[in-house]
Amino acid sequence: MKYMILSYASQQDYDGMAGQESGKPAWTAEDFAAMGAFMEKFNNDLIESGELVETRGLAAPVLTRRIGQKDGAAVVTDGPYAETQEVLAGYWIVECESMDRATEIAARLGDTPAPDFVRATAYADIRPVLEGRDDLVG
């Protein structure tokens, strides 16, 4: 079964990783390097175990466009959004034997090096990936 592990961040988080203060302290170069090294090892471990299908990080919310509808017409809103609003920051798709195993994998993200104020609010979601519409009926 495939599972998607989703991580979240706010524009403030992206700014902090870029070394900018924006209501939260800026990350140091050492903080950012430690996180990068952890993520590289995390991804390589999943490649070696054969469980990684795909992973990607996403650009900052300021680069986002949201498409909605109003009175039958498309409405486009550019970022940034409220700084406290969390958005999808990245994801992993893993293929493993169970939700429990996907949970074990995602729990390892809790070891990601980051400033304490970031670690205190970090979380990830895990969702099964549907292979087709028949998976919705069940």
Image (cartoon, rainbow, N blue to C red):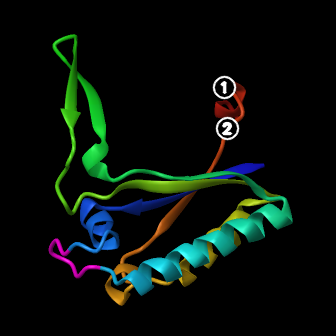
Q: Determine the secondary structure under disc 2.
A: loop
Q: Determine the secondary structure under disc 1.
A: helix
Above or below for 40 versus 59: below
State the extent of the magenta-drawn residues as a range: 21-26
In this view, which residue lies farthest toward the bottom? 116
Q: Which mark is residue 130?
A: 2
Above or below for 42 versus 67: below
Q: 53 and 41: which one is in front?
A: 41
For residue 11, what is the image quadrant?
bottom left
Q: 131 and 27: which one is in front?
A: 27
Residue 118 drawn in magenta: no
Amino acid tagged 1: Arg
Above or below for 49 versus 28: above
For residue 71, what is the image quadrant?
top left
Residue 25 at x, y percent in the picture? 23, 82
Residue located 28% across and 74% down the image: 19
Residue located 22% across and 44% down the image: 79
Left or right of 9 on screen, residue 107: right
**Quadrant placement of the C terminus:** top right
Residue 107 at x, y percent in the picture? 61, 75
In this view, which residue lies farthest toward the top? 72
The secondary structure that dominates the magenta segment is loop
Marks 2 & 1, CB-CB < 8 Å contact: yes
List the residue tagged with mark 1. 133
Residue located 76% across and 71% down the image: 45
Amino acid tagged 2: Leu
Left or right of 65 on screen, residue 50: right
Residue located 59% across and 78% down the image: 38
